[in-house]
């Protein structure tokens, strides 16, 4: 497994969100709605993290809570680590380490980070890959919830989610996140990716490919898939792979916007808006490139299993072969540094 660590600058992200207008034009009017009462209420994930923290005993805190910038001797800055299959702490959610009340709160945090229409899909992913939610999930809390800096991190096979309470400046989702799925436990999926809850995202991207003409397809196709964990930001002059979105026509750009919308709408509205604000801050989708990798085409059907949407400080890497791994890293500035 590989990891990525984030070195952030201590700036005020709340002011950034106010100044850039988080609900912007990138992915359509559906994302411009105000936050629901639930997201503003005591039931939002960050407030539940505070309630969870307050119930932890001192012995529990010694295991699952850490200083904000705690550095693990073997894993580096633990709060910002990301991997496709890892355990940030040892106790699993369903173990006797946690009380029933604490398990309920952890579940509420998990659900609160996701759009409600995706709860069942993520639960299916967890059941297929880990035996069910809580069976292998682990949590950690960094800093002190309720203060200016704290973050909740949940890990498991094919899942890393974060609730940061706007503690991490410039960065969407509280830092890099990961999701994936191996629905049948066979490791190698068939061309149609039957049962994979995330495959529709690849189909959305491939619809854009179908809109491209012959010359555009040549620009968009890349012969060798880039290392999937390589989600460090390249900046405006980074030499991105694939075709530039700014060179697409209106209907093709609309297809890219729909693809982006299919990606972000899995998550709670505030995270959707923050991610889109970051995209806008770096120049919008016109600053991004879309690449389709041709070296791992399951079934040889030219429905590209591996693809990548990337901009100066935006990476959404979809690896569909041999099964789905998705790496996400989004910020409003390429100055947010990542170290592999």
Image (tube, rainbow, N blue to C red):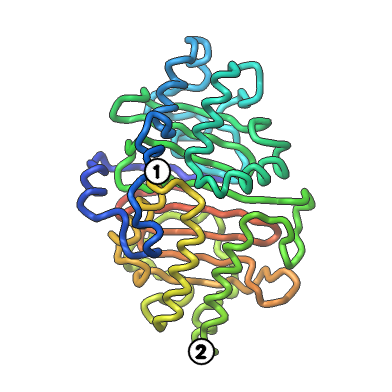
What residue is disc 2 on? Answer: 215
What residue is disc 1 on? Answer: 6
Up the image or down, 15 lies above or below 234; here it is above
Q: CA distance from mark 2 to mark 1?
A: 38 Å
Expressed as whole percent of the image width and height from the top left, the position of residue 216 reads: 49, 85
Observer-nearest residue: 233 or 33? 33
Expressed as whole percent of the image width and height from the top left, the position of residue 73 reads: 49, 28
- Element under label 2? helix
Report whether 133 appears left or right of 7. Answer: right
Residue drawn at the location 42% of the way across and 45% of the way down: 173
Which quarter of the rendered picture does the N terminus lie within? top right
Up the image or down, 143 lies above or below 230; here it is above
Residue extending farthest to the bottom is 214
What is the quadrant of residue 14 in the picture? top left
- Element under label 1? strand
Circle 2 Cα neighbour tier, 10 Å, few/some/many (<14 / 14–19 / ≥20): few
**Which disc is residue 31 wearing?**
none
Expressed as whole percent of the image width and height from the top left, the position of residue 120 reads: 63, 45
Q: Which mark's residue is nearer the viewer, 2 or 1?
A: 2
């Amino acid at each position: 497994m590989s990891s990525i660590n984030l070195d952030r600058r201590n700036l005020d992200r709340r002011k950034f969100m106010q100044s850039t207008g988080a609900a912007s034009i990138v992915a359509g009017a559906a994302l411009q709605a105000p936050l629901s009462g639930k997201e503003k209420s005591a039931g939002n994930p960050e407030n539940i993290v505070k309630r969870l923290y307050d119930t932890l005993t001192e012995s529990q805190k010694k295991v699952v809570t850490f200083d904000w910038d705690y550095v693990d001797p073997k894993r580096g800055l633990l709060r910002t680590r990301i991997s496709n299959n890892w355990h940030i702490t040892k106790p699993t959610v369903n173990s006797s380490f946690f009380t029933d009340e604490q398990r309920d709160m952890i579940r509420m945090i998990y659900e609160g980070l996701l759009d409600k229409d995706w709860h069942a899909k993520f639960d299916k992913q967890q059941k297929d890959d880990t035996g069910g939610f809580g069976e292998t999930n682990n949590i950690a809390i960094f800093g002190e919830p309720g203060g200016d800096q704290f973050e909740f991190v949940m890990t498991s096979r094919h899942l890393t989610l974060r609730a940061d309470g706007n503690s991490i400046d410039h960065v969407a989702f509280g830092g890099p996140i990961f999701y994936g799925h191996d629905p049948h436990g066979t490791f190698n999926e068939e061309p149609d990716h039957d049962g994979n809850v995330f495959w529709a995202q690849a189909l959305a991207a491939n619809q854009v490919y179908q809109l491209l003409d012959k010359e555009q397809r040549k620009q968009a196709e890349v012969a060798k898939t880039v290392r999937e964990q390589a989600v460090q930001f390249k900046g405006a002059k980074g030499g991105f792979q694939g075709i530039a979105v700014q060179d697409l026509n209106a209907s093709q750009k609309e297809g890219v916007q729909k693809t982006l919308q299919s990606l972000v709408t899995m998550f709670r509205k505030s995270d959707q808006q923050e991610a889109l604000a970051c995209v806008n801050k770096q120049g919008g989708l016109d600053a991004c490139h879309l690449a389709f990798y041709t070296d791992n085409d399951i079934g040889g059907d030219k429905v590209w299993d591996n693809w990548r949407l990337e901009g100066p400080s935006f990476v959404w890497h979809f690896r569909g072969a041999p099964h789905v791994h998705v790496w996400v890293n989004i910020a409003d500035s390429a100055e947010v540094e990542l170290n592999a």
